[in-house]
């Protein structure tokens, strides 16, 4: 579904991403983990056309999308939920959802009904200003807004950031439901590496703008270097594992 080859991004003289290679298959959840500043958001932004790549290839559904405008990439079925949610604070929940559907010409009501069924809280608060919602509600709204574009592949950037553990569990359960019910593929950047690997089928490790490791989630969880760098040790790791929302 998604193929990234030798993707590189520069910000002036700074090489933020170098020769990144990754794939996401149909109905697959893949996570990208790494320290702050490793280049994780840059990967998503380059794939979705938000920032230009200086080299490399991005293919989606057997078509090259490298160099396309972000709006065209959305219309192709690849939609990003940005870090920090970035809802429109002075617009209502319904107006935010309508903005997500700007690229679609049909099936608006059907899509809206499915989003509100997935997130009943949004239906309850449909007239409320987005800026007055809690962080968890705003994250639901950001995901719902992306779903209004009827994506085939969803890019999620740090969906758990700043949220309480119970809210995080709800968000991750929703991601499982999206894959199970809609057949949606997901590329996830997540600060909670253990939770991301518990959710994902496979993962990539990014360090200093380079992908340094990849494998199934089980392989990365068993890798001592990954555990030491991102998942903690012994008792701390066990406590972290207990907080991961379990699959259902």
Image (cartoon, helix red, strand yellow):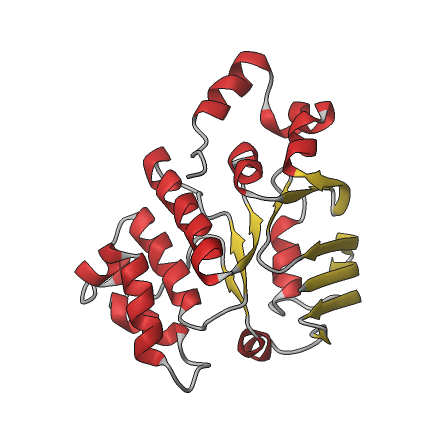
Q: Is residue 28 above or below residue 103?
A: above
Residue 103, percent across and down? 46, 81
Q: Seen in the image, is 238 located left or right of residue 113?
A: right
Q: Is residue 60 above or below residue 158?
A: below
Residue 54, percent across and down? 78, 66
Image quadrant where residue 95 sits: bottom left
The residue nearer to you, when weighing 48 against 36, is 48
Residue appearing at x 63%, y 70% in the figure: 49
Q: Seen in the image, is 63 located left or right of residue 74?
A: right
Locate the N terminus by quadrant: bottom right
Residue 116, percent across and down? 28, 63
Q: Is residue 40 above or below residue 143?
A: above
Does residue 115 appear in the picture of this structure?
A: yes
Q: Residue furthest bottom?
A: 105
The residue nearer to you, when weighing 235 against 162, is 235
Locate the C terminus by quadrant: top left
Q: Is residue 247 above or below residue 103?
A: above
Does residue 15 appear in the picture of this structure?
A: no
Residue 213, percent across and down? 76, 39
Residue appearing at x 45%, y 51% in the figure: 175
């Amino acid at each position: 579904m998604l193929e990234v080859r030798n993707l590189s991004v520069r910000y002036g003289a700074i090489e933020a991403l170098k020769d990144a290679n990754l794939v996401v298959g149909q109905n697959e959840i893949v996570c990208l983990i790494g320290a702050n500043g490793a280049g994780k958001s840059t990967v998503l932004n380059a794939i979705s056309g938000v920032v230009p790549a200086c080299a490399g290839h991005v293919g989606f559904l057997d078509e090259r999308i490298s160099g396309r405008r972000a709006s065209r990439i959305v219309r192709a079925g690849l939609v990003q939920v940005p870090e920090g949610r970035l809802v429109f604070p002075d617009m209502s929940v319904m107006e935010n959802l309508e903005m997500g559907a700007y690229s679609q010409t049909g099936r608006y009501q059907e899509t809206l009904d499915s989003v509100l069924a997935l997130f009943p809280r949004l239906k309850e608060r449909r007239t409320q200003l987005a800026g007055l919602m809690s962080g968890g509600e705003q994250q639901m709204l950001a995901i719902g807004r992306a779903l209004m574009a009827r994506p085939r592949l969803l890019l999620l950037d740090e969906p758990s950031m700043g949220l309480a553990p119970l809210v995080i569990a709800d968000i991750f359960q929703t991601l499982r439901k999206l894959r199970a019910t809609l057949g949606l593929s997901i590329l996830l950047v997540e600060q909670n590496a253990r939770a991301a690997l518990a959710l994902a089928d496979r993962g990539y490790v990014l360090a200093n703008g380079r992908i340094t490791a990849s494998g199934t989630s089980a392989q990365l969880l068993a890798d001592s270097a990954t555990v030491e760098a991102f998942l903690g040790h012994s008792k701390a790791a066990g406590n972290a594992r207990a907080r991961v929302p379990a699959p259902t």
